[in-house]
Amino acid sequence: MLTDNMWKNKTFSELTTDELYDLLKLRIDIFVVEQTCFYPDLDNHDRHPLTQHLFCYQKGVMTAYLRILPKGLTYTDYISIGRVVIAPCARGTGLGHELMRVALALCSTDFPNDTVKISAQEHLEKYYNQHGFERVSDMYLEDDIPHIAMLKIR
């Protein structure tokens, strides 16, 4: 399942200062600057003791990141995956699919009895379908970007 990428999975308190800086910079570079979406990225969910930060570096640059949030934080009855991001220099390489495979394996191990729910940008529906997610809502706007709710079907 894993390639040569060195995946790291850490809680907030385990992150180094450099890792925290790099993940916040990557999220801001993509979600705020590239997508011109001004929103409060720092929502305190990062600090929750059960939130997991999954990421990898390639040639000293953080190129992939997401966070796994425990049940009750984003959704009452579901765990969730969010802030899924791939650096522009790594797009089109399959890294996004690898990131999702690793994340879903972690969810199965760490939250074996929980279902994963995501709020996905609508244009990424087929990407998430490839990982077993099915659309469960109509389109809605989140920070002025079309999104859909999706559930991971076991």
Image (cartoon, grey):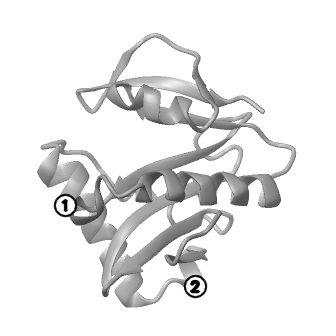
Horizontal and vertical percent for residue 49?
A: 66, 69
Who's the residue at 42% across and 55% down the image? Answer: 94
Q: Secondary structure at mark 1?
A: helix
Which corner quadrant holds the N terminus? bottom right
Crowdedness near tag 2: few (<14), some (14–19) or many (≥20) residues, C-alpha within 10 Å: few
Compared to residue 133, the image places residue 107 above or below, namely: below
108 on left or right of 19? right
> Which percent across, then down, holds residue 58?
35, 79
Q: Which residue is mark 2?
A: 14
The residue at 87%/44% (across/down) is 113
Question: Which residue: 49% across, 76% down?
Answer: 5
Q: Position of residue 44 (x, y in %)?
A: 47, 60
> What is the number of the mark on residue 148?
none
Tell whether 50 sits left or right of 122. right
Do the residues under discs 1 and 2 have CB atoms within 8 angstroms? Answer: no
> Is 54 above or below relative to 82?
below
Amino acid type assigned to the residue bearing label 1 in the image = Asp
* Closer to the camera in the image, 126 or 65: 126
Mark 2 element type? helix
**Amino acid at dot 2:** Glu
Looking at the image, tell me whether mark 1 or mark 2 is earlier in sequence order: 2
Foreground tag (1 vs 2): 1
Q: Which residue is mark 1?
A: 29
Front-most of residues 75 and 5: 5
Image mark count: 2
* CA–CA distance in space, label 1 to label 2: 23 Å
- Residue 119 drawn above or below residue 25: above
Quarter-wise, where is residue 8 in the image?
A: bottom right
